[in-house]
Amino acid sequence: MTSVGTFTVEDGIGILKIDSPPVNSLSRRVRAALAEGFTKFAADDDVKAIVLICGGRTFFAGADIGELDEADPSNLDGGDSASALEKAEAGTKPIIAAIHGTALGGGYETALTCHYRIAVPSARVGLPEVKLGLLPGGKGTQRLPRIVGAARALDIMVNGNPIPAPEALKLGMIDALAEEGRLHEDAVAFARQVLAEGRPLQRVRDRQDMVDPDKGNTQLFADFRKANAKLLKGFKAPEAIIQCVEAAVNLPYEAGVKREWELF
């Protein structure tokens, strides 16, 4: 347990809860709590699956703006190039992100590192960094196309509008809806269902089925640039996002991540 994180076990399900008012920004303290929690649960043989949930009025709101000039924001443990969450992602225990309020920017990028995502109907998810003149810098440009496809990812990131949970479910941005007010209980039940059904771990970074069909499809990106010429004119971030999605489609994941970071 830390000042912002609690780690409990409910009959084989590890509950990693972050409560850092007012909006659970991914500050240094929060990243440290994530690292501690995931490391603890990874080493506990009694824990078969992990639920990542937040207290207060929202899921992770995103990066701590005051720390944006520091280390690579994609490193959730604040230093090691392979973050604690990404180490857990590569492990054998399913991780379920339980979303309420908003999961935007770095918050949704955190959810994308989990194997599954469940949200209450009132939640909203997305990558709105373009509205700040930025591109998603926590590997979101490489992960999102892998679950919704290049065309949809372009629209979501270049426009930057939050997506309501019911629509996000249809798009594949989340995997299930919880009942309003029962996120904790439904997330735990979902984790048990994943275990009972022996579902494979859905590592977003490894998925190619949604991007391979557009490999080498330069026309897709040319058409998007033409259709959104007014939106792109005079702004660097939208074009940078397009180039990142092109990398997600045409390059191996790690090479795409490197391209994202260069453009960020």
Image (cartoon, grey):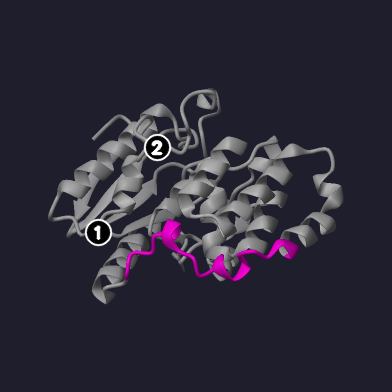
Circle 2 — which element? loop
Which residue lies under the disc numbered 1?
A: 92
Q: Residue 207 in magenta?
A: yes
Specify the principal SS of the magenta part.
loop
Q: Is residue 90 left or right of residue 117?
A: left
Question: Looking at the picture, how far across and down is residue 203, in whole percent?
Answer: 39, 60
Quadrant containing the C terminus in the rendered view: top right
Residue sitting at 54 percent across and 38 percent down? 261
Which residue is rendered at x = 56% and y = 55% of the image? 248
What is the span of residues highlighted in magenta in the rendered image? 200-219
Q: Earlier in the sequence, mark 1 or mark 2?
A: 2
Nearer to me, 48 or 181: 48
Classify residue 252 as left or right of residue 151. Answer: left
- Within 10 Å of the Cα at label 1, are there few (<14), some (14-19), or many (20+) other Cα atoms? few
Q: Quadrant of the N terminus?
A: top left
Is residue 121 visible to the viewer in this orientation of the structure?
Answer: no
Task: Report the amino acid beneath label 2.
Answer: Leu
**Would residue 213 be seen by someone viewing this image from the given angle?**
yes
- The image quadrant that residue 85 belongs to is top left
Q: Which mark is residue 71?
A: none
Magenta highlight on residue 65? no
The kind of secondary structure element at disc 1 is loop
Q: Compared with residue 68, is residue 18 higher up or lower down, i.e. above or below?
A: below
Question: In this picture, is 164 found above or below 261?
Answer: below
Q: Residue at x 87, y 49 (%)?
A: 230
Rendered location of residue 252, percent (x, y): 49, 55
Determine the residue located farthest toward the bottom in the rendered image. Answer: 197
Identified at 58% across, 36% down, the residue is 262
Disc 1 residue type?
Thr
Q: Is residue 233 above or below residue 198?
A: above
Q: Which residue corresponds to mark 2?
A: 76
